Amino acid sequence: MYCPQCWWSDEWDAATFAREYDWQRPFLKQLKELFYEVPHMSLSVDYPSLENSEYVNYVGHIKNCYLIYGADYCENVYYS
């Protein structure tokens, strides 16, 4: 897992996880193996638009929020 800032940075190269396609093996099996080896982003958050908001995921443009998921343009929301 990579933090969102690390995920979008140029400090790592996604091409290092590339592999040659093996025509003798099923595609979905190879895709599954690749999925488990490639790092994933830990949170989907628009950090520049957050203000005083902790423990949030899949959010943007929020202010004074705590422990919420899947919200935009919220203020003073808790445990949602």
Image (tube, helix red, strand yellow):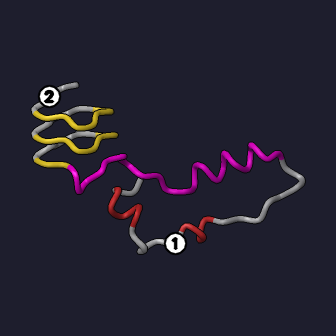
Q: Which residue is drawn at 39% across and 69% down?
A: 9
Q: State yes or no: residue 16 in magenta.
A: no
For disc 2, the neighbor class at 10 Å (few under 14, some 14 to 19, many from 20) is: few
Measured from the top left, where is residue 36 in percent x and y? 58, 49
Residue farthest front in this picture: 73
Residue farthest right in this picture: 24
Instruction: Classify residue 12 as left or right of residue 27.
Output: left
Name the secondary structure under disc 2.
loop
Measured from the top left, where is residue 17 in percent x and y? 60, 65
Q: The C terminus is located in which quarter?
A: top left
Say above or below: 54 vs 8. above
Measured from the top left, where is residue 76 in percent x and y? 10, 32
Instruction: Classify residue 70 as left or right of residue 27.
Output: left
For disc 1, the neighbor class at 10 Å (few under 14, some 14 to 19, many from 20) is: few
Say above or below: 16 vs 78. below
Q: Say which amino acid is labelled 2.
A: Tyr
Q: Say which amino acid is labelled 1.
A: Asp
Residue nearer the viewer, 73 or 2: 73
Q: What stretch is highlighted in magenta?
A: 26-49
Residue farthest bottom in this picture: 11
Residue nearer the viewer, 65 or 15: 65
Q: Which residue is drawn at 13% across and 42% down?
A: 63
Name the secondary structure under disc 1.
loop
Q: Name the residue under label 2.
A: 78
